[in-house]
Amino acid sequence: MQILKHRRIRAGSNQYNLMRGRRVEIRRAELSDWDAIWEIWHAVVADGTTLVYAPDTSKEEAFPLWMTPPAVPYVAVEGAQIVGSYIIKPNQPGLGSIPFK
């Protein structure tokens, strides 16, 4: 699986033209998407360049971080293949949610 970390997209609908006429649909993730999400998530986190997740985070540890409330997970789907994922969630609790003055 080739993992592309950065792609420029234009908003306007839930489908985006990426490169050479390819189409990607953005939709809410479903539980059945977890295995595909995990492949991408693990490949990105395992290289140790992320600031939040430990490189040795297990699939079992990652699931509630990505797939359960308060996180709202989304996937990017090209054809029938999940090619990306992201979550929307509140800021970190406690002092992490308070802006600096």
Image (cartoon, rainbow, N blue to C red):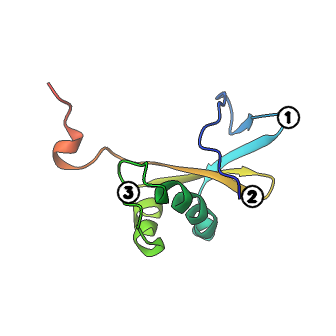
Q: Secondary structure at mark 2?
A: strand
Q: Residues within 10 Å of mark 2 (few under 14, many from 20)?
A: few
Q: Earlier in the sequence, mark 2 or mark 1?
A: 1
Q: Nearer the viewer, residue 39 or 65?
A: 39
Q: Secondary structure at mark 3?
A: loop
- Distance between mark 1 and mark 3 Cα atoms: 34 Å
Q: Is residue 57 left or right of residue 77?
A: left
Q: Secondary structure at mark 1?
A: loop
Q: Report the residue marked by disc 3.
A: 53
Q: In which image quadrant can residue 20 be found?
A: top right
Residue 13 on image: x %, y %: 69, 34
Residue 72 on image: x %, y %: 47, 53
Depth check, mark 1 against mark 3: the one in front is 3
Residue at the spot x=53%, y=58% of the render? 41
Do the CB atoms of the residues marked 2 and 1 lie less than 8 Å apart? no
Residue 40 on image: x %, y %: 59, 58
Task: Please indicate, yes or no, whether residue 30 appears anywhere in the rendered image.
Answer: no
Q: Residues within 10 Å of mark 1 (few under 14, many from 20)?
A: few
Q: Residues within 10 Å of mark 3 (few under 14, many from 20)?
A: some
Residue at the spot x=73%, y=35% of the render? 16
Do the CB atoms of the residues marked 2 and 3 lie less than 8 Å apart? no
Q: Amino acid at mark 3?
A: Tyr
Q: Report the residue marked by disc 1.
A: 21
Residue 64 on image: x %, y %: 41, 67
